[in-house]
Amino acid sequence: MKIKEIIVVEGRDDTAAIQKSVDAVTIETHGYGITKDTWRLLEKAYQEKGIIVFTDPDHAGEQIRRRILEKFPNAKEAFLDRKDAQRDGDIGIENAAPESIRKALEKARYSIEQDTDVFTMEDLRQAGLAGNADAAGRRQKLGKALGIGWGNSKRFLQKLNKFGITKAELDKALQEI
């Protein structure tokens, strides 16, 4: 599988895992302290090829993702499920199986601008994604199925709307889980 965009990852172990999984070029941020040279490289990649932000599914990875998206709001995003990225207590893309990485990249999405939100918190409650004991596990499974990652109910609602998930897509994914 060849990826035309440049994939933005945190480190060299992530690059190695990506290269075992797909034919792609990566840029490494080397953590949160992104250098001026790396920012320039990201800008060039964003303008010329497009980028896919693919950071670890942990707090640090989310912070790095937010920083990158502030500067490059039209970047694609790919998400890896925490369970797929965990080995011996360590969470990171470098721990994921090639098939999990391929699936995450196949589901990479752009953030979209919408006039109104499609989903409300009431929709989440009715779907069993908020307000019950099983909700967190259902959001995790659904986030993996849709390729939008996991989040608490408020964040998950934002992701559904941000990535332009349709009611038909949500219904289909709910049936799958």
Image: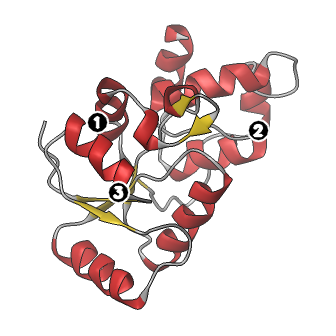
The amino acid on which the numbered mark 1 sits, given as a three-letter code, is: Glu
Residue situated in front as seen by the camera: 108 or 165: 108
The earlier-in-sequence mark between 2 and 1 is 1
* 49 over 24 or under it: above or below: below
Q: Quadrant of the C terminus?
A: top right
At horizontal 47% and vertical 37% (from top left) the residue drawn is 80
| Element type at mark 1 | helix
As measured in the structure, the alpha-carbon distance from the residue carrying label 2 to the one carrying label 1 is 25 Å
Q: Quadrant of residue 32?
A: bottom right
Q: Indicate the colouring scheme.
A: secondary structure
| Element type at mark 3 | helix
At horizontal 37% and vertical 36% (from top left) the residue drawn is 104
At horizontal 55% and vertical 73% (from top left) the residue drawn is 67
At horizontal 44% and vertical 42% (from top left) the residue drawn is 93
Residue where numbered disc 2 is placed: 153
Eye-nearest disc, 3 or 2: 3
As measured in the structure, the alpha-carbon distance from the residue carrying label 1 to the one carrying label 3 is 21 Å
Residue 12 shows which numbered tag?
3
Q: Position of residue 174 (x, y in %)?
A: 56, 16
Q: Position of residue 14 (x, y in %)?
A: 37, 49
| Element type at mark 2 | helix
Residue where numbered disc 1 is placed: 106
Q: Residues within 10 Å of mark 1 (few under 14, many from 20)?
A: few
Query: Going by the picture, which residue comes out furthest to the front?
Result: 88
Q: Is residue 172 left or right of residue 26?
A: right
The amino acid on which the numbered mark 3 sits, given as a three-letter code, is: Arg
Question: How many badges with numbers are in the image?
Answer: 3
* 112 over 133 or under it: above or below: below
The earlier-in-sequence mark between 1 and 3 is 3
Q: Is residue 80 left or right of residue 15?
A: right
Q: Is residue 167 visible?
A: no
